[in-house]
Image: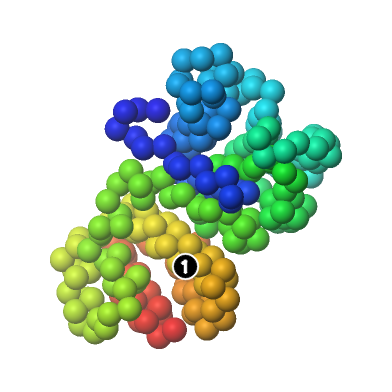
């Protein structure tokens, strides 16, 4: 890891984590997360254990990636490994690359194992786009938006309009959009950040058994997912955000 990059904190009480970011960034964070648990010095980066993790050769890890596309057969070794009993002091990590390329049939075959893995087993999913990961996997993971951590999208002038409960009238928002000069690329990144925020809020609502908040979150997530599936054409970013504001604030 670069000194300027803070590794994701690995909460072992959560069985599955989803890292959203560029291929290189997601790899670095995945290495650091696993090394922090398999290295006797909490991820020293220099010992044999850390080196084996980095080379994807550590005996307590299994890396899974699609050749051209994922098939259910690729997960047979994963299920075979899960049949071996371990305990929480003897962790094993499944790192599933390009999770945004996983079709629903493959993802659904993992659901029970991801939600309630046997003692000692952990899942780490890597993806470049949050919206590409099927909802059933997303809802079972702690989501870490690495682009959001490594940039300032949570401080973007439009972010608060879609996350705050404070009242904002459409005219005020329209002025903020015009002043922001938001581009197509920034729109995609901001959509990812907002999706992460509302999926995290939904998970909290589930834990707190707040059915009303769950319903609101799902409606808002649906709006952001639809917008993400149809990214803005050149020159149309401002219109996208103005329309999205009216849709989301109507929930």
x and y, in percent, of residue 57 in the image: 64, 20
Nearer to the camera, 94 or 153: 94
Q: Is residue 66 left or right of residue 223?
A: right
Q: Is residue 195 left or right of residue 171?
A: right
Residue 166 visible from this viewpoint: yes
Nearer to the camera, 16 or 170: 16
- At horizontal 46% and vertical 20% (from top left) the residue drawn is 45
180 is higher (above) or lower (below) than 5: below
Colour scheme: rainbow
Residue 239 visible from this viewpoint: no
The quadrant the C terminus occupies is bottom left
x and y, in percent, of residue 96 in the image: 63, 39
Nearer to the camera, 23 or 123: 123
* Residue that label 1 marks: 201
Nearer to the camera, 112 or 69: 112
12 is higher (above) or lower (below) than 188: above
- At horizontal 52% and vertical 57% (from top left) the residue drawn is 131
Q: Is residue 59 left or right of residue 188?
A: right
x and y, in percent, of residue 168 in the image: 25, 81
Q: Is residue 136 left or right of residue 221?
A: right
Location of residue 183 (image quadrant): bottom left
Location of residue 38 (image quadrant): top right
Q: Residues within 10 Å of mark 1 (few under 14, many from 20)?
A: some
The quadrant the N terminus occupies is top left
- At horizontal 48% and vertical 28% (from top left) the residue drawn is 42
x and y, in percent, of residue 163 in the image: 35, 70
Give the secondary structure at mark 1: helix
């Amino acid at each position: 890891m670069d000194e300027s990059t803070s590794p994701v904190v690995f909460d072992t009480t959560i069985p599955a984590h989803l890292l959203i970011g560029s291929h290189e960034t997601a790899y670095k964070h995945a290495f650091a997360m696993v090394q922090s648990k398999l290295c006797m010095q909490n991820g020293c980066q220099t010992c044999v254990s850390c080196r084996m993790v980095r080379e994807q050769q550590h005996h307590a890890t299994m890396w899974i990636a699609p050749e051209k596309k994922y098939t259910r057969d690729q997960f047979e070794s994963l299920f075979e490994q899960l049949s071996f009993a371990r305990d929480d002091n003897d962790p094993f990590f499944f790192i599933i690359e390009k999770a945004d390329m996983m079709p629903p049939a493959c993802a659904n075959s993992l659901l029970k194992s991801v939600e309630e893995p046997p003692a000692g087993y952990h899942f780490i999913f890597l993806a470049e786009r949050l919206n590409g990961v099927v909802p059933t996997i997303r809802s079972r993971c702690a989501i870490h938006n690495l682009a959001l951590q490594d940039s300032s999208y949570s401080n973007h002038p439009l972010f608060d309009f879609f996350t705050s409960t404070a009242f904002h009238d459409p005219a005020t928002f329209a002025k903020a959009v015009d002043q922001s000069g938001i581009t197509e690329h920034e729109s995609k990144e901001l959509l990812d950040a907002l999706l992460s925020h509302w999926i995290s809020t939904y998970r909290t609502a589930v834990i707190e058994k707040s059915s009303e908040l769950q319903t609101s979150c799902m409606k808002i997530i649906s709006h952001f997912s639809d917008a993400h599936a149809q990214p803005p054409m050149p020159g149309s970013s401002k219109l996208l955000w103005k329309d999205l504001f009216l849709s989301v604030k109507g929930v």
